[in-house]
Image (cartoon, grey):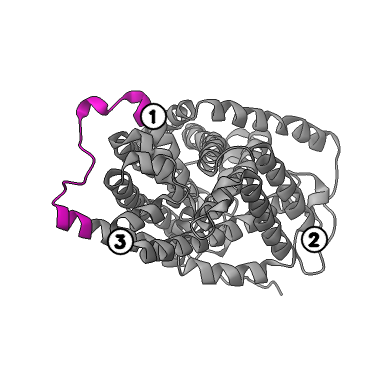
């Protein structure tokens, strides 16, 4: 008799999955990266939220038409074939471990509030980053249960520092009447500044597609996933807009530009030293929790693709505990190389570069998914929808625009994607069967 796996994820759990995967250390470091842009950053946030909602709408409609698990990989494969599906899977995997470098850098940055030597000694912050990465790698190699327990604890603490900053900003505005806000001058708004800021802000919204990946475990996926994707993206976007704008506009730019813990410095400036330490602690915990969750994914993604015959078969081997140890190890090796190659950068520089690189790589997957929505309608695989065509085309233009805004990071991301072509060619040439568990 066939055993039917219970579907445990309802609407609010899917919303939590989307929001939880978006909120990590990224938002806590973004004000330092956005400080040079002033009001351009606010406009960038508005455009990013609009673009992200267009992408979320595309994912929502694709998920309704193809409710099976796999998300972007499935949609692209259905539209353009296995090779395009492989490139999306490859780009998604790369974006995860590159993004983990940014999350780790942001987490370690907030630890510098407690031990300033982390910020001044380049080798020290690199060493702590690598210790954190490999500590979580080892924990994930012992199985998902241990990592999942850690995730439950840290997820519960994620929203507290963000709510605290919003309340403090409201108090400051109430006391000063807005006199402390950075003055707005229309002449300061520039296309270059807005584009650069919008590309950086998209980093914080990566993960909008999270609810589409475990579709097989979702209750009524045709309805639940589309709604959860849109609601989760809108909620996270609004929170980010309010929080980051408050920090950027109520803190002197010179202080933010060199800050290794911008939220903590904002709280220290307006709320006192003790509050600064509390905020820094919560931010570090939030970053650590996000890194733990994404470290789990960076092993599970190549493992799942290997089982499907898309990635090399040796990555499909699991331990006695059921953990894809080989996939975890090879992902963390690449992550280590990336962090070590950039260890000489300051923590803000390291975070900014990694965030741009991860964003640029993700945009290739988002771009292909937007084009997939158009293609699948043209060939009759999806119900015709004029609104979806328009939104998908807007999402396509938005993806190209933000890729342009990423600058050199787009070229690096393109190089990383090209490196996947010989692997795909070898997999197609050599017929292999995934290793049995």
In magenta stretch: residue 423: no
List x then y, in percent, for residue 218: 52, 63
**Residue 216 visible to the viewer:** yes
Q: Which residue is mark 3?
A: 271
Q: Is residue 101 left or right of residue 38?
A: right
List x then y, in percent, for residue 27: 43, 50
List x then y, in percent, for residue 1: 71, 75
Residue in view at x 58 percent, y 72 percent: 6
**What label sits on residue 318 in the rendered view?**
2
Magenta stretch in the rendered image:
171-195
Viewer-nearest of discs 1 and 3 = 3
| Closer to the camera in the image, 298 or 159 | 159
**In what quadrant of the picture does the C terminus appear?**
bottom right
Q: Which residue is mark 1?
A: 195
Q: Residues within 10 Å of mark 2 (few under 14, many from 20)?
A: some
Q: Is residue 329 left or right of residue 120?
A: right
Q: Secondary structure at mark 1?
A: helix
């Amino acid at each position: 008799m066939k055993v039917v796996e219970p579907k445990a994820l309802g609407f609010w759990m899917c919303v939590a999955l989307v929001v939880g995967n978006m909120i990590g250390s990224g938002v806590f470091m973004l004000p330092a990266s956005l400080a040079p842009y002033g009001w351009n950053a606010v406009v960038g946030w508005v455009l990013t939220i609009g673009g992200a909602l267009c992408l979320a709408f595309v994912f929502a409609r694709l998920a309704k038409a193809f409710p099976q698990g796999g998300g972007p990989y499935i949609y692209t494969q259905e539209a353009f074939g296995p090779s395009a599906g492989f490139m999306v899977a490859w780009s998604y995997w790369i974006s995860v471990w590159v993004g983990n470098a940014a999350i780790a850098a942001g987490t370690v940055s907030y630890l510098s509030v407690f031990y300033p030597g982390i910020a001044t000694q380049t080798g020290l912050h690199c060493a702590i980053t690598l210790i954190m990465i490999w500590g979580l790698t080892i924990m994930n190699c012992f199985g998902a249960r241990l990592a999942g327990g850690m995730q439950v604890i840290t997820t519960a603490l994620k929203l507290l520092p963000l709510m605290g900053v919003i309340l403090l900003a409201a108090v400051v505005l109430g006391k000063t009447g807005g006199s402390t806000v950075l003055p707005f001058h229309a002449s300061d708004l520039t296309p270059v500044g807005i584009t650069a800021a919008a590309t950086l802000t998209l980093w914080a919204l990566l993960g909008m597609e999270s609810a589409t990946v475990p579709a097989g475990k979702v209750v009524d996926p045709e309805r639940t996933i589309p709604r959860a994707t849109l609601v989760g993206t809108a909620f996270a976007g609004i929170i980010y807009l309010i929080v980051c704008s408050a920090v950027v506009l109520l803190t002197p730019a010179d202080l933010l530009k060199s800050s290794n813990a911008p939220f903590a410095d904002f709280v220290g400036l307006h709320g006192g030293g003790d509050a600064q330490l509390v905020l820094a602690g919560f931010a570090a915990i939030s970053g650590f929790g996000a890194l733990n969750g994404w470290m789990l994914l960076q092993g599970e993604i190549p493992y799942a693709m290997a089982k499907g015959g898309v990635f090399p078969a040796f990555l499909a081997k699991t331990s006695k505990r059921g953990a894809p140890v080989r996939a975890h190890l090879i992902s963390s090796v690449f992550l280590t190389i990336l962090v070590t190659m950039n260890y000489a950068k300051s923590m803000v520089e390291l975070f900014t570069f990694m965030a741009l690189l991860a964003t640029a790589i993700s945009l290739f997957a988002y771009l292909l998914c937007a084009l997939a929505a158009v293609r699948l309608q043209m060939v009759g695989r999806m119900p015709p929808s004029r609104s979806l065509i328009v939104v998908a085309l807007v999402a396509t233009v938005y993806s190209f625009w933000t890729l342009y805004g990423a600058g050199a990071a787009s070229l690096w991301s393109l190089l990383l994607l090209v490196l996947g072509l010989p692997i795909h060619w070898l997999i197609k040439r050599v017929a292999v069967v995934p290793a049995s568990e």
